[in-house]
């Protein structure tokens, strides 16, 4: 049994900053509801990243605070946001034209499960108390040129969210390119999952044991 209380897991902010490292200058990026929305608070000054919100905003800035808050300017999760210079607003339908037309370079979504083949399940677990809401996740998972997943590595009960086959209703098949968790960064490749980096104090063998699926190790 691996005791994770002895290691420093990545915080949500840490994961967001790690994802930003892999976003190229000039990219158009959609942020899904939940953890991915925090990425807007960590935009680097040395790169131009154009954040897209499916409700009709391109050029979204950090989450709004205090006097910045405009209740009519929100992201897809209804959180108040800011607009960067040059930002634009559009109709909801036009926003989805950007998504379905392949104009979004990267989408970052949360997930309940990701399979070794890159299948993603992120809209329903079967919990009768939860309201199933796929929103634009299916459009984004297939419309974006690349799909990143930002999630906790384990469930609250300690089960891995990385699986051989998704058991929850699917959002998309073979769509995920890279997975960012509180324990590691993992690429989805034709040969399987490839661990790119992981937290200090955790060995690759321990990461693989916690993940519960076959995994390759990126060579130095």
Image: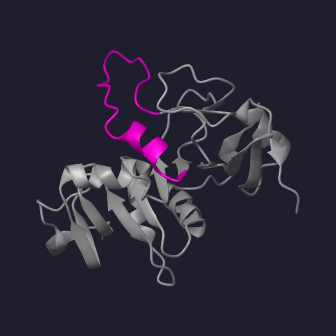
The location of residue 106, given as percent across then percent down, is 50, 57
Residue drawn at (49%, 61%) of the image: 13
Q: Is residue 64 visible?
A: no
Residue drawn at (22%, 49%) of the image: 93
In the picture shown, does residue 177 fall above or below 160? below
Q: In the picture, which quadrant includes the N terminus?
A: top right
In the picture shown, does residue 52 fall above or below 108? below
Looking at the image, which residue sits at the far front? 101
- Seen from the viewer's position, the closer of residues 130 and 199 is 130
Residue drawn at (43%, 50%) of the image: 35
Q: Is residue 102 visible?
A: yes
Looking at the image, which residue sits at the far bottom? 46
In the picture shown, does residue 73 fall above or below 209? below
The location of residue 82, given as percent across then percent down, is 25, 70
Left or right: 15 as drawn, with respect to 199: left
Residue drawn at (48%, 77%) of the image: 44
Q: In the picture, which quadrant includes the C terminus?
A: bottom right
Q: How many marks?
A: 0
Q: Is residue 127 magenta?
A: yes
Q: Is residue 121 magenta?
A: no
Part of the protein shown in magenta: 122-146
The location of residue 96, given as percent across then percent down, is 30, 49
Secondary structure character of the magenta stretch overall: loop
* Figure quadrant of residue 191: top right
State how the image is colored: one colour
Left or right: 98 as drawn, with respect to 82: right
Left or right: 24 as drawn, with respect to 99: right
The location of residue 171, given as percent across then percent down, is 46, 31
Looking at the image, which residue sits at the far right? 219
């Amino acid at each position: 049994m691996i005791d994770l209380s002895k290691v420093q897991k990545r915080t949500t902010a840490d994961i967001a900053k790690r994802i930003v490292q892999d976003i190229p200058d000039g990219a158009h990026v959609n942020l899904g509801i939940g953890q991915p929305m925090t990425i807007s608070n960590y935009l680097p000054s040395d790169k131009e990243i154009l954040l897209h919100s499916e409700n009709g905003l391109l050029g979204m800035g950090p989450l709004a605070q205090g006097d910045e808050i405009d209740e009519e300017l929100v992201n897809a999760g209804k959180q108040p946001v800011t607009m960067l210079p040059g930002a634009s607003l559009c109709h909801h339908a036009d926003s989805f034209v950007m998504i379905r037309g392949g104009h979004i370079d990267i989408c970052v979504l949360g997930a309940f499960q990701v399979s070794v083949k890159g299948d993603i399940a992120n809209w329903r677990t079967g919990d009768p108390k939860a309201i199933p809401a796929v929103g634009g996740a299916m459009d984004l998972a297939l419309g974006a040129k690349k799909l990143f997943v930002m999630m906790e590595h384990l469930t609250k009960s300690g089960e891995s969210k990385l699986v051989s086959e998704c058991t929850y209703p699917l959002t998309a098949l073979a769509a995920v390119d890279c997975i960012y968790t509180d324990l590691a960064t993992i690429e989805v490749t034709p040969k399987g999952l490839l661990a790119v980096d992981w937290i200090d104090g955790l060995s690759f063998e321990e990461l693989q044991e916690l993940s519960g699926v076959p995994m390759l190790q990126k060579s130095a």
